[in-house]
Image: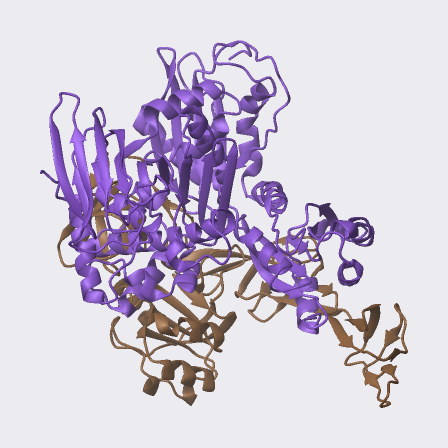
Chain colours: A brown, B purple
Amino acid sequence: MMPIARETRFAPRAQIVRRRLLPVPGRVCVHVGDRVHPRDVVAEAEVAGVLRVVDVARAIRVAPGASVTRGTALASGGLIPRRVYAPCAGTIQGIEEGCVFIREEPRTLSLTAYVPGEVVETYPHRGVAIQATGALIRGAWGSGGEHEGWLVVAAQSPADALSWERVSLRHRGAILVGGMLDDPRTLCRASQFRLSGIVVGSLHPRLREACEQSWPAVIVTEGMGSIPMAEPLFDLLRSLHGSAAVLSGAPADNGGPPELIVPFSLDDEAAPMVAPRPLAVGVRVRLTREPYLGAVGQIVGLPESPQQTAIGTQTEGAQVRLSDGRKVFVPLGNLELIE
Amino acid sequence: MSESQPIESILAADIGSTLTHVCLLERVEGVYRFVAHAEMPTTLGGSENDVTIGLRQAIQRLEQVAQRDLLAGEELIIPEDEAGKGVDGFLATSSAAPPLECVLVGLTEDLSLESARRACMASQASVAEAIPIGVRGRRWDSETVSALREMPPDVVVLVGGIDAGPIVPLESAARILATIYQDVSARDRSLCIFAGNQEARRSVASVLSPVLEVRVVDNVRPSVGTESLGELQRELAETYARVKLAALPGYRRLARWSAPLAQRGLVPREDNGAQRPSAAPLPSPAILPTSEGLSATLRFIARRDGLTRGVLGADVGGTTTYIGAARSEIYQWATNASLGTSYGIDEVLEYSGLDNIERWLPVAMGREEIVSRLENARLRPYGVPQTMEDLLLTQALIRQALLLAMRRMRRQYWLPLDTRPEDDITPGFDLIAVRGGAIAHTPQDGLIALTILDAVQPTGLTRLVIDWASIWPQLGALARYAPLAAAQVLERDSFRELGTVVAPVGVTREGERALDLDIVRPDGASERVEIPGGTIRRFPLALSESVTIEVRPARHLDIGLGRKGVGGKAIVRGGNLGLIVDTRGRPLGLPQDKQLGRAKMQEWLGALIHDAHSP
């Protein structure tokens, strides 16, 4: 059977390359070979200021093209004499229908390195590629932006819920790891104490919206509901307890999944992160659909032809030996390569 | 392959938002046949952001299934060589591109903006914002203006005013839009479609054209009581193909692969090599929208079979649900972007609510469990249901996506806007043709049939077919270049026929007689059965068999003849499920009590999956 290529969901040690690109043409601030830290600015661009509208149904005292400073009188008059002032400095872009359109002064957009590493490529006017060595964990779901912090494993087991009592002021700036997240108070505390992020196996679906609106970045490795974190992944994170890490709850630059990176020394030897890799007999996989959702196993067979599932669907798949010893047939669409 | 030689083999791909399907078509003994099919996840986003990666994986799988080399490295072998490697032509349809993002600017919320919103909902477009500019509703606030400027939509739709009405508000809106976009570079300019008062066309276009690309179409509200959405929908569809599909990563390779067939299409030929008399140049985009391909197929079926009541087609995809209806020369359609069974789950949930999904489940499932399962299906859209609960939940989702899409279709084309709920009924069609990844992966025909009966709610006498090989859109695209090949494959290999449905319109009561049915077989053997209301009955009838049926409904029911209590005779063909009689009434009502509802769903499902009625 043809080997089906899949992305690895996590790797304990790999070469990771991240492209950092400006949304508009600008200036690249680093050179190939430079070593950068997460907060270093690698590129910047000048972007147009925000366009503001001031509704002035009175005698207008400015003209298109004019520059204004904050507080400049835009209009005055009417039955009850009253002035309307510019809410910001900028240029009058137009006056239509009694509305003054003010273009704020241009601002500078700074793009940081995000991942600590070495600049391996520059793209003139657009950005850079940074190479790092480290552990990589790709999430199934995420929220929030890019953050850095110390990894703190706050769970005893992969099924351990991250309760609110485990979040305290001493975790300020940390990335907290737990098995499951189902308590909104945990999120409140994480926001209150300004944690950098939370990494859990699963999230209760009613907390999805709260996560999207709250401060810390959240990465969910398995899915929604009450699914323990995959054991090999939990073991890896536990072994990295106390390490510096970066995470991105939003899709990465390339539109990929949310991720957690624990960088190692640049001088560490590591295999390049080759994606995708073929599914093959012997590789470890995570099962992503009921009734085996969250289970981890090893591929022991790749049948040549489509097989029938328990409910009668004919589909291509793999024979997987689960950690409890059972051998089950799993459709290819329900498998993820885990390392 | 020279220009005069017939095309021996064609690879036809459909690149969906979740799955990529490839079908191999070949000339076998002078007739084009479907040979093999394969599917792989679509590769869009992430590190594999190129649709041709997933396409090549699907072709590699097809090579194994068909035992034939099609690729040389990363390239498709075109034309087919003497050793039989490769294919003579390639074509693709796709629904993988995200919908067009539209901002609507209009005079009145409940008239012009509402019409524009309906046009977008029926197209491959999503409405990011609707800005009413009538005096009372003026919304040119800083937040709106900033969003318009910082994140320009793909399309600004400017509507408002009846024809021959005042034009000043529209000119004013045009000037404001011109002010907002005056410093946007030409590369980043949005398209503005003006679909308002015809009198304002010239002045609005002259104000906007220096800063936006402007297209003018018919007024969506030429008068207060008239709505005209066709032109705007056509323009949105054309823009989607031009802007969004052409931006799909991998488009260039697709263009290269499809060029040989497209070049032959410049001089359309019959498949015997004879040049057709009217050789007008055909458009040759690398990818045709899936909906356009499907619409060509549905129109062809309606014409070929002379279906007076027409054919209704439904495509439930991962992100988009499309409905098309072909009747004589009229084609009506609605594309519901963001309504689907994987990436489109959120919108189905938003518009339906959880209760309306739960009501279709024949088994008890906690609300939190339903949400978790749906969320996980959305996170991993390539997944295949492995448990009966997941399968039933997927079917419930398909029902709701179809119900919402059908409701929009009825409102837009078939029923007045103020239709009472009890009159919200699907008109009769001769054929209902359904397709989509989740449908094709459903293991039992009975389950698919019940989903269609519940969601589309056919009336009268209707045949049900499904696109088991995911090939209908590609055949529509192929018909532009090789109509005979498309027709031959469609005729012989592309349908899975579920059977014929008889469904009376009206309210039925359980236990009370709904209709009497006589079945007369060709050998003269006959059966007579009285069927009560609130049931589904199945009568085995092979695809090759035809029988004469006579239906006599109760006096308050209409079997599609437009008159209550009037019976009729018809010759019907069988299918995998045979003849199905659905006396649950139209519109379909479900029990309010959840436990009772589950019991009824089990009963109806059982009737289609297990029990065939023997009188």
The answer to whether any part of residue A262 appears in the image is: no
Relative placement, left or right, of A123 versus B604 is right
A143 relative to A45 in the view: left or right: left
Task: Indicate the position of residue B343 as horizontal and vertical percent values.
Answer: 42, 55
Residue A165 at x, y percent in the picture = 33, 87
Q: In this view, does A24 lie to the left or right of A234?
A: right
**Looking at the image, which is closer to me, B334 or B178?**
B334
**Taking B511 as reference, is A258 above or below it?**
below
- Of residues B567 and B4, which is closer to you in this image? B567
Counting the numbered discs, the total is 0
**Which quarter of the figure is the N terminus of chain A placed in?**
top left
The residue furthest left is B615
Q: Where is residue A154 in the image (x, y as percent from the top left)?
A: 32, 79
Between residue B332 and residue B548, name the one nearer to us. B548
Q: Return the x and y of residue A45 as percentages of the image width and height.
A: 71, 63
Q: Up-down: is B465 above or below A103?
A: above
* Quadrant in which residue B400 is drawn: bottom left
In the image, taking residue B217 as reference, residue B257 lies left or right, namely left
Question: Which residue is found at the position 24% from the left and 68% from the top?
Answer: B366
* Quadrant of image for the C terminus of chain A: bottom left
Q: Is residue B403 visible?
A: yes
In percent of the image, x 37 and y 81: which residue is there? A184
Name the residue: 23% across, 51% down. B386
